Image: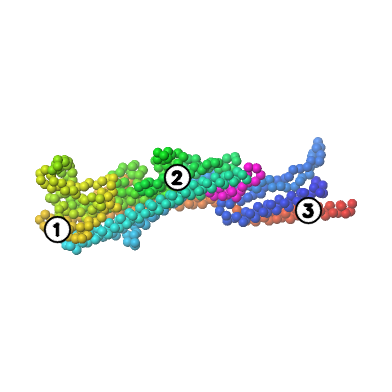
Amino acid sequence: MANGMGSLYIGASGLQNSQNALNTTANNLANADTKGYVRQQVLFADRDYVNFKNAAISKQQAGLGVTIADVVHTRDYFLDRYYRTENGRQSFYETSYEAVREVEDMIQELEGERYQDTLDSFRKAFEELSKGPNTEVNQNLVVQKATIFLQRTQGIYQNLKDYQSRINLKVNNAIDRINELGHKIQDLNQQILKIESGGVETAMTLRDERDNALDELSSLAKVEFSEDAKGAVRVRLENVEFLDEIHVFEVQGIKDPVTGFVTPIWPQLSDMPRKEYTPMFNFSVDISSELDTDIGELKALVLSRGDKVANYKDVAGIPADRYNDGAGMSTMMSAQAEMDQLLHNIVTAINDIFSPTKVTSFVGIDGTVYNNVRVWDEENACLGKDGEKPGRELFVRRGCDRYKEVMGQDNQIYYVYNEEDNLDTSKMYTTQGIIVNPDLLQSESGLPHLTKQGDPAWDMAQALVDVWKKKDMIVNANNTNPCTIEEYYERMVDGIGTRGNVFAGLSTDLDREVESIENSRQQVFGVSSDEELSNMIKYQNAYNAASRFINVINEMLEHLVTRL
């Protein structure tokens, strides 16, 4: 046992270390609700012993008290990695579902009226026309409903484009945030290295900040991380080096000059002067959990937005593999393409009845050979009240007329159909490229409704009604059963709803899983108020015991000094 004076050191060490343990416990309690805070646990150890003798039987030693061996800052690497993977996956599906939900709202509801009702009203206008094709009231009704149908379709299509632009802003913001977090983690790395380089102190608060930044980064993109022996964290993003001790390899957004859409790329892997870019995401690989390709909000945003504004050419006649690797991957593009295809099929079917065509061959007066071209079918066509030739179409393209007039070598006038230009949307029957025929808006009687003999065109009017009954429409390459116009719309909405249900279900399940993993993490490093209060009582009692120990030693020494 130590001598009397040495015993004071033992008591003093008890006081000092109990006080430090109390401070640590108080700090834990103060930060119980701080996000990402890792509790600090005090580990006590004996101080060195003083040897008095080195006897053969046993040593005589005197202890110098207690010391704090370490203040543990505990995290579970495997739980952190698991949490960040599933957190990124949950963000991917939640973001994807949000895009689907927006599309559902746009298509099914607009200013309180369902789009289905607009289609139904347009169909009924033709039914009324079939009861009296020569009646101006019925002709006017067709023109009015055609205008409403086109305005509603264009309104929905424009809303889809606007939401694409909003997603594009989110892509920009996500890229900026990723770079901000990268620089923040690098700065924290440097601060941690400075503090811990002496091997004495652990930069606990800074480590907590860094871990919080990694958690947030994991929600934006696929993250892989490792900590070196010095305490610095290295980060890989989407399988590419993003952050080391010295550098942050920023993600850069390249803006498309036509669409304005931003694509995230890796500048360090790209040939910037030649404009040969390495994209951040490889969409040639299937999106699946098995391949870990369904992770990160940024990837979901880019996928949901797509790389362009789609039209019916992105779905019509496209094989399943091309569709699924193209417009089918994007919520917005698939909705735009299918919506545009619905309008295109309705418009072209109606126009081909009002102003029918046939295939023929002839030689123009200038020697030009027209082989197997479509021309206005005058024999089977109807005319308006004014007898205008060729018969007017209900919907016209902004960029070109329906026909061009050509004089043949046989002195016959041919009205050659201007085929749609796949590269110029203004020359296609697409949502943004057509308007209701201005001539019919001025005088609805110009709508073809009379036969060559001047009789009401009953057969033509019935053919317009039959357009809505024909099963000749296909939604996309994954839904190839022929259907009517109304069935097409229902299947289109059902397809969007199915996609949304899948995303919503996965998002909900992953949200529960992330919460469960977070609970497991909290069991490792979270603050328990009950446990900390128990520790506080323990350290308080230890402090009191050390204090009483010092008082006893003090009285003993006083007795020895005064009496001897």
Identify the residue shown where x is 12% and y is 50%: 379
- Mark 1–mark 2 contact, CB under 8 Å? no
Report the front residue among 140 and 290: 140
Identify the residue shown where x is 55% and y is 43%: 233
The reply to whether residue 116 is visible in this rendering is no
The reply to whether residue 560 is visible in this rendering is yes
In the image, farthest residue toward the top: 56
Where is residue 311? Give x, y as percent: 31, 49
Report the front residue among 37 and 52: 37
In the image: residue 362, left or right of residue 169: left
In the image: residue 211, left or right of residue 385: right
Residue type highlighted by circle 3:
Ile
Identify the residue shown where x is 17% and y is 60%: 445
- Depth check, mark 1 against mark 2: the one in front is 2
How crowded is the residue under tag 1: few (<14 C-alpha within 10 Å), some, or many (20+)? few
What's the CA distance linking mark 3 and mark 1? Answer: 118 Å
| Residue behind mark 3 | 550
Residue type highlighted by circle 1:
Asp
Identify the residue shown where x is 39% and y is 55%: 101
Residue type highlighted by circle 2:
Gln
Instruction: Please tell me the numbered disc located at residue 386.
Output: 1
How crowded is the residue under tag 2: few (<14 C-alpha within 10 Å), some, or many (20+)? some
